[in-house]
Image (cartoon, rainbow, N blue to C red):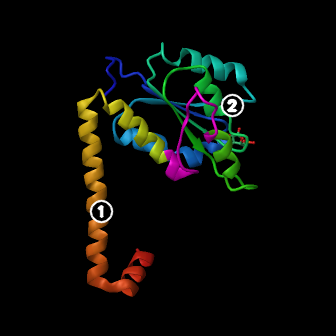
Amino acid sequence: MSNKPDGSPIVGILMGSDSDLEAMSSCPEVLAELGIPHEIRILSAHRTPEKTAEYARTARERGLEVLICGAGGAAHLAGVVAADTILPVIGVPMKTSTLGGQDSLLSMVQMPRGIPVATVAIGPAGAKNAGLLAAQILALSRPELAEKLCRYREKMAAEVLAKDARLQKLGVSDYQAKKNSG
Ligand code: RP5
């Protein structure tokens, strides 16, 4: 998958704190499912600003091609990383206990003209989509990955249609009862 013989990471996943790990876990999971080499780092825009800048500045030369940043609250991680690299940066806003992640979303998405961050949805669904979006970017130059993404979509569609067939067969009450018991 990596175009490099050593299989070194081509996606960098950053998060502002270990408290983001659980919500972000669907991101490395989907990358692993697609066979995409990646690395995961805890780096903070505010608590480790120099290390974060160094990571962003050296990411390209280390062979990384897409960066994914999860952060919550005053979620500036994706923005400061984007300021220091021309790699595509995908931001994942974390849900917060005080403001439900609206704070993370707005501080991440409202980038100034010239420095884009592709911000996805709040929380685990966004983390998974960040992984998939990274895969779609990488698939532009990797036909085998494009093929895997097509299979992924087909599998998803088949699962939905199987659920629909089951719902038509069982009706709502039995469907729900069996779903809750299984
Ligand atoms: C952000 O602050 C992190 O991304 C995290 O979502 C939030 C809270 O961090 P902790 O106080 O739990 O370390 O920088």
The residue singled out by tag 1 in the image is: 159
Residue at 29 percent across and 43 percent down: it is 149
Mark 2 CB in 8 Å range of ligand 1? yes
Image-quadrant location for residue 41:
top right
The image position of residue 29, as x and y in percent, is 44, 43
Q: Using the image, determine if residue 8 lies above or below residue 168.
A: above
Query: Can you say which quadrant of the picture contains the C terminus?
Result: bottom left
Q: Secondary structure at mark 2?
A: loop
Identify the magenta region: 109-127
Residue at 36 percent across and 22 percent down: it is 7
Image-quadrant location for residue 99:
bottom right
Mark 1 CB in 8 Å range of ligand 1? no
Residue at 28 percent across and 81 percent down: it is 168
Seen as rendered, the residue at the extreme top is 61
The image position of residue 101, as x and y in percent, is 66, 52
Q: Using the image, determine if residue 97 lies above or below residue 60.
A: below
Camera-side residue: 149 or 28? Answer: 149
The image position of residue 156, as x and y in percent, is 31, 56
Q: Quadrant of ligand 1?
A: top right
Question: What amino acid is at disc 1?
Answer: Glu
Query: Can you say which quadrant of the picture contains the N terminus?
Result: top left
Q: Using the image, determine if residue 109 lies above or below residue 99.
A: above
Looking at marks 2 and 1 on the same chain, the residue that comes earlier in the sequence is marked by 2
The residue singled out by tag 2 in the image is: 44
Q: How many marks?
A: 2
Q: Secondary structure at mark 1?
A: helix
Give yes or no for residue 38 being in the magenta stretch: no
Q: Predominant secondary structure in magenta? A: loop
Question: What amino acid is at disc 2?
Answer: Ser
Residue at 67 percent across and 52 percent down: it is 102
The image position of residue 92, as x and y in percent, is 57, 42
